[in-house]
Image (tube, rainbow, N blue to C red):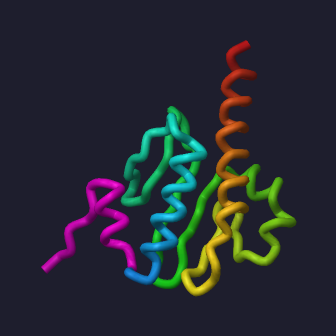
Amino acid sequence: MPVKRPTTVAEYVRAAPRDGQPHLRRLRSILKSAAPKAKETLKWGTPFFVEPRFVFAYSAHKAHLSFAPNPKALAVFRRELENCKTTKNMVQLPYDQPFPDELVRTIAKYCVAELSRRESDSFW
């Protein structure tokens, strides 16, 4: 029998691997507080925050979360992320390691500020 795909972010969190749910709830809470005006939505089966453009996304996997801020944020925080596995577009946050609350919060706030700055620059 096929598994029903989540249709809401809350369903996505409940369907995530049990080991990852505490990290997933913590990540979601930090991102909500960093971008309180952003709308949470599922796109392509992945939670996104949009305001009205992409702010960040995340996803749960068997052994880690992936946090996807904008690529510029990953470049800016390259030094702080050197102990994390990263790609061009995301950071892996393993379930078996302490959750980096402050680093995620700082990156998330940077993304929101950067989006706000870009929108104000493009206005004029």
Against 35, residue 101 (above or below) is: below
The x and y percentages for residue 19 are 44, 83
Report the residue at 35% width, 56% height from top. 9
* Farthest left residue in view: 1
Residue 99 horizontal side relative to residue 75, left or right = left
The x and y percentages for residue 73 are 74, 52
Report the residue at 32% width, 58% height from top. 10
Residue 1 horizontal side relative to residue 63, left or right = left
Quarter location, residue 98? bottom right
Against 31, residue 124 (above or below) is: above
Q: Is residue 2 magenta?
A: yes
Q: Which residues are magenta?
A: 1-17
Quarter location, residue 35? top right
- What is the quadrant of the N terminus in the image? bottom left
* Farthest top residue in view: 124
| Nearer-the-camera pick, 20 or 91 | 20
| Nearer-the-camera pick, 27 or 90 | 27
Residue 17 horizontal side relative to residue 112, left or right = left
Q: How many marks?
A: 0
The x and y percentages for residue 33 are 55, 47
- What is the quadrant of the C terminus in the image? top right
| Nearer-the-camera pick, 43 or 47 | 47
Against 68, residue 109 (above or below) is: above
* Farthest bottom residue in view: 96
Against 13, residue 113 (above or below) is: above
Q: Is residue 58 magenta?
A: no
Report the residue at 49% width, 58% height from top. 28
The x and y percentages for residue 107 are 71, 54
